[in-house]
Image (cartoon, grey):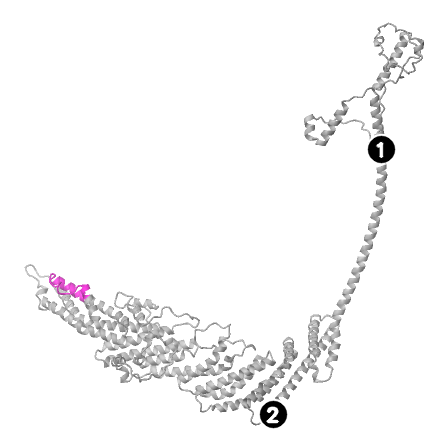
Amino acid sequence: MSKTPTPHRRAGIPATSTPRPKPQFTIEEWEAKAPLSDLALKSVAVVKTASEKTPLPLKISINEDEPSRPSTPNLRGKVGLVSRPSTPVPTSTRQFVSHALHPKQPVQTPQQFYDWFAQIDKSVAHSQEAHFRAHVAVVSEHLNTADTLIERIDEIEREVGGLLEGWRSVEDGGKNLKDACERLLEERDRLLELTDEIGARLEYFQELEHATRMLNHPGESLVLQTDFLYMVERVDICIDYLKAHRYYKEAEIYLLRFQQCMTRAMTLIRMFFVGSLRALTADVSRRLSEKDVSSTAQMHLLYTRFRSVSQLSPLLRELERRAEAHPEDLSALLSECHSAYFAARKGLLVGRLMEEIRGLDPAHTELVELTNAGCSYLKHLCTDEFNLYREFFNSGEDQLYTYLENLCDYLYDDLRPRILHETRLTTLCEVCTVLQALMVLDVAELPEEPPDDGNLIVDFDQPKSKGLEQLHISHLLQMVLQDAQTRLFFKAQSVIQAEIRYYTPKPEDLAYPDKLVTARKPVSQYEIKEKDSVSQLFQLPSLDKKETWFPTLQKTVWVLSQLHDFVKPVIFEDIAHEAVSFCRQSLVTSSTLVEQRSSTGVLDGQLFLVRHLLILKEVANNLDYTPKDTEPRSDIGGVTDTLASVLNRTTALLPDALFASLGMPRGHDTFSDSRHDIDQDLKRACQEIISFCARLPCDPLREWVDRVQAFNDARIPFSSGQQAPLLTEQEWAKRAIAENLHQVFIETCERDLRSFVTKLRLYLEDDRTVSVLVTHIEEAIIDAYLKFRNVVWNMYAGAMKTVVFSQDGLRDYLKGICK
């Protein structure tokens, strides 16, 4: 069998000298690690089908006349068997045999046969290996083709590498060129930006030439040109810029020159304004000096003509703004404009103002009328002046208020002496009312001020911020109001000292209860009561019938009602406590005088004191407030509530503990508050009234009970055989005496207690108020009578139970009398 030709190895792949052992895999592992797709499975099936058809071995080509295949030779010769020789072929037949496997000579010997058979065998083997050789040839051809392709690919790779290298070279060159161009553009932009920055900075320096050239232009009309204010604005900008960049070369020199330009420009504005103002003032003054100039024409000349030159307002606003920005250089120019304006206005108004004040006749006109007319005129005048000033300026409020105060002084010089020498308290109050009425709208329009407590009181301790948005009349009327309030305060103090503290009662002042009886008579329809202006603080239902009050109480309430709305709360509180304290002292002293003049003595005096102290206590409670407290006090009640708070919170006869409910500390007798003193005096007066009313019916019973108690205490035990005297055997302790005491008690209650209750209603008037005291009187009588009842029940073995009252029966009996 021939050798299979060795195929050419692919260039570039070295042969492995020693093969490495291959890993062993099972079919299942191979299938799990390398699964085939559907396309791969179909390809394997096609290959399997093709491999099942094995091609036939290469046949020996013979002539068509000959058999297609020679007979199979006998192989027994190879194994040493001797076969029978074949039949010799005739000569005629041998000449047609031309195949290579045909023996060239006829086979005559076994050796020839064996040689021929070996040749036949080799031919068969060769024909059987023909398809392997064909496959090897095809594979060799494919390898040669693949080697050719690899060589071609290598060649193409070399060519592509050359192209890539060339492209990279071009790319680097282009990038370098682009970077160079960008650097040139950046350099150009930087140079342009630098040029612009230099030009922008240079503009500030170049503006000096333009400003200097404009300011050197002759004529006063320069300030009215359109470019003038624009030039001023540019100069101001340049000044601010150079101040912020003083490190520039020659910046200080240019800054000084720009400031000089600004000063020159503002000086031109000041000169033009002062010149225009003088010309206008001269023209108005000349026309006012003419005869028969009506008030309407005067108002036109003084205000309308001045508003006609308010076209200068933009220039003045520019001057104000520059003076605020550069006060060290330009504030003097603005002050000159203010001074020139105020001098011009004052020269025009003083004559007319003095004429108006002379028309008011300050020496003979009533003070209130003079205050009302004069201050109203000044208010309108100051308002007009303020509005006109605002047409020109938006600053200089201090100078404006100084100017307005100077105008007001012409009236105040006549008004202040009248106020400081006024002796009538009501007149001073009316003056304060007029002044506060002029100031109240001004105060109400100040949103930053806290709400007041309802009084027309203006506090000038804290300075108010003044501006040109609104004229503060309160600032102008401040001095006059303070003079009136000061005079009102001192006058009120003198009234308190003379008519309250040192008041000497007249006989008719002490005529109680006659004065109360007279007050109950109906008033004639023709009787006209004098108008009494009282503060809202004292307009309470319990403060009626003031004609029945003691004069010091009347004067106290009157003075405090006058002062309440016109002085500061702190001052009012001090003087109110002083007045209440002096009034209380006068009431206590007068109650003693009433006792001396009255037929019932103590009862009238103490009822007089209780009546007036209840009213004074309510007045004091209404005065008990703090300036910041705008809510009404929740513990202020009427006369009835006041008395009930004193009497209804105790089980004993008015102990000190009941005053804890009134907000007073227990045991502090030296407490200086006037309300505490009123409560103490009221307590003592109520004790006296209750004790007096309960004394007459209960004193006989109390004396008899004390005598019985003394007899029982004085009994000495006798020796054996002797019997102690019995209490019921005593002449004064018999049952008839006890029954007589009970009858006397009933008669006294019917007579005296009913009279006392009637007098209580006369003094205290309100039934609820009277019932408070009556309840405590009844309790005192019941307590004394129950002691008598307990004694007689025990003494007479219950025989008096049907005679004396039970507790409920006595209570009902007393209520029937008191009603």
Q: Amino acid at mark 2?
A: Arg
Q: Quadrant of residue 16?
A: top right
Magenta-tinted stretch: 785-810
Q: Is residue 673 visible?
A: no
Position of residue 114 measured from the top left corner of the image (x, y, whole percent): 88, 10
- Residue 147 is marked as 1
Residue 577: x and y, percent?
Answer: 37, 76
10 Å neighbourhood of mark 2: few (<14), some, or many (≥20)? few
Q: Which residue type does callout 1 highlight?
A: Asp
Compare residues 676 and 474 and report the one nearer the observer.
Answer: 474
Q: Quarter holding the N terminus?
A: top right
Q: In the visual, does 33 lie left or right of 663?
A: right
On screen, 719 above or below 292?
above
Residue 580 image-quadrant placement: bottom left
Q: Secondary structure at mark 2?
A: helix
Give the residue number, with chain letter if any, for mark 2: 286
Residue at 27% in and 77% down: 608
| Front residue of this view, candidates 173 and 491 | 173
Query: Spatial distance from mark 2 to mark 1, Cα to Cα?
Result: 129 Å
